[in-house]
Amino acid sequence: MREAALFRSKTYKTIRSFFDERNYLEVDTPILSSTIIPESTIENFGTEFRNPFLPSQELYLLPSPELYMKQLISEGFGSIYQISHCFRNSEQLGRIHNIEFSMLEYYSVGFDENDSITLTEELFDALEVPELLQPPFRRMSVAEATKIYAGFDLEKTQNQSLLKEEALRLGLNVLREPESWEETFNRIFLTFVEPNLPQDAPLILYDYPKQIECLAKPNGPFRRGWELYGMGMELANCYYEETDEATIGEYYRSEYARLIQNREVSGGIIADVDPSLAKTFATMGNVSGVALGLDRLLMGMMGRSSLEGVILFPLSAMITAGTRNL
């Protein structure tokens, strides 16, 4: 355990030196919040503020520091970075998953998604990562990966009926009607594309379909962002951040409606959303943001096969131990 702690400490020092040398400001934002950015694919941990002299209030452990970091950029802080703890409920527990995890998030003012690839390659060079994580990163579009590993042209299957035909050809059943284009594509991607991505070098998978809702700028039928895969794991994702107020507001409304629908099916917390944030985020200017999972990166750098031994007290181990003791 001490070896892992020493390695993490050394890595964090290198990360801080890397960004400090480039005039990024390190910030420290809350992990407990009264509001969130709505994301229907993420379930949040909830708690309650109680005080004998004040009204009680629901609070949430944040899944990312994005909420407050974007507000700082809107206030003119310039390029910033943060190492923080993040929390996601209803996630897997196991070899590469823990419901509390460490994230490096960095926002570069004046950068687009391609600039952020170069910056991340420079970061990996500074960290002296092992051979299987060394830059330059290989680059592949989602359309190219879909063609190679699922055998169809993504640009020619932009409506649900055509995509459904491809899903049936691949042996997948459409789970329910009406299943959305995004739901069908995600099942194709997770079944046929992601497991077969090359693992002999880091891979940037870019231009995800526009139908996958997120706060990345659109580019035709795709979105301007990427995900970084290394050693068989997703390590990071990047957006060229959306700054159109109407688009951000519509995203909030759509994701909040999905959250309510998901709660009706499986339960869970519906966190409060601050509608004024759409206006705030629209003032950021041109910004590219990257979220890098530090625990998985350290796991790869240390040559470990599991997060246990990388995270000092993984909740997966605690929960398993608690179950055995019942």
Image: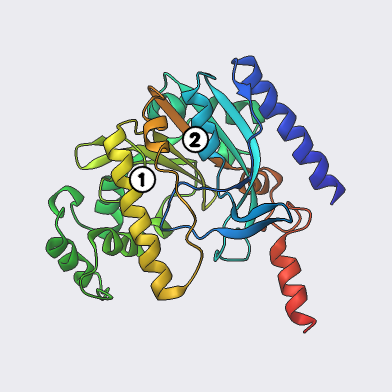
Placement of 66 over or under 326, stated as above or below: above
In the rendered structure, the answer to whether residue 90 lies left or right of residue 13 reads left
Residues at marks 2 and 1, CA–CA distance in whole angstroms = 14 Å
Task: Name the secondary structure under disc 1.
Answer: loop
Which amino acid type corresponds to the residue marked 2 in the rendered image? Answer: Val
Left or right, 17 with respect to 225, comes to: right
In the displayed structure image, the side of residue 49 where residue 309 appears, left or right: right
**Going from the N terminus, do you reach mark 2 or mark 1 first?**
1
Whether residue 17 is visible = yes
Residue at x 43%, y 51% (from the top left corner): 38
**Residue at the front extreme, as displayed:** 53
The answer, for residue 98, to whether it is visible in the render is no
Left or right? Give the position of 320 relative to 133: right
Residue beneath the point at 28% across and 39% down: 247
What amino acid type is highlighted by mark number 1? Answer: Cys
| Foreground label between 2 and 1 | 1
The residue singled out by tag 1 in the image is 214
Q: Position of residue 5 (x, y in %)?
A: 81, 44
Q: Which residue is mark 2?
A: 290
**SS of the residue at dot 2?**
strand
**Which of the two residues, 51 or 58, is positioned nearer the viewer here?**
51
